[in-house]
Amino acid sequence: MGAVLEQRVLLYDSKLHLFPGKLKSRWTGPFIIHEVHPNGVVEIFNPTGNQTFKVNGHRLKPFIEPYSTDKEEINLLEPPQL
């Protein structure tokens, strides 16, 4: 992933429990990329907690903003009347 400053990303968070087969993983975030280091480390900012921390860049994926579900109806059979 090509990390871009101020881009919103999700962090892959996996937690291993004591029992086999109970690996729980999920995506947390979104976080904001604060700094990118040349060795692949990305420093991300948590806007809810006002803290920054460093993670491996492979554990990040771009956050896609939800789009508006408002619908507009357009009649394609009849031309608009002026």
Image: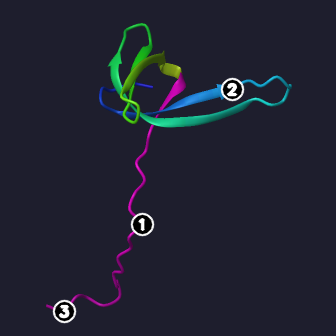
Q: CA distance from mark 2 to mark 1?
A: 34 Å
Q: Which residues are magenta?
A: 59-82
Q: Position of residue 3 (x, y in %)?
A: 38, 24
Q: Quadrant of residue 9?
A: top left
Q: Main secondary structure of the magenta part?
A: loop
Report whether 4 appears left or right of 60: left
Q: Position of residue 51 (x, y in %)?
A: 38, 24
Report whether 16 appears left or right of 30: right
Label 2: which residue?
15
- The three-letter amino acid code for the residue at tag 1 is Thr
Residue at x 41% of width, y 18% of height: 42
Label 3: which residue?
81
Q: Nearer the viewer, mark 1 or mark 3?
A: 1
Q: Which numbered disc covers residue 61?
A: none
Q: Are marks 1 and 3 in contact (CB under 8 Å)?
A: no
Q: Position of residue 22 (x, y in %)?
A: 80, 31
Q: Are marks 2 and 1 in contact (CB under 8 Å)?
A: no
Vertical comparison of 20 with 41: above or below? below
- The three-letter amino acid code for the residue at tag 2 is Lys
Residue neighbourhood size for the residue with mark 3, other residues' Cα within 10 Å, grouped as few (<14), some (14–19), many (≥20): few
Q: How is the image coloured?
A: rainbow
Residue at x 30% of width, y 30% of height: 6
Residue at x 30% of width, y 90% of height: 78
- The three-letter amino acid code for the residue at tag 3 is Gln
Q: SS class of the residue under badge 1?
A: loop
Vertical comparison of 2 with 27: above or below? above
Q: CA distance from mark 1 to mark 3?
A: 27 Å
Q: SS class of the residue under badge 3?
A: loop
Q: Which numbered disc covers residue 69?
A: 1
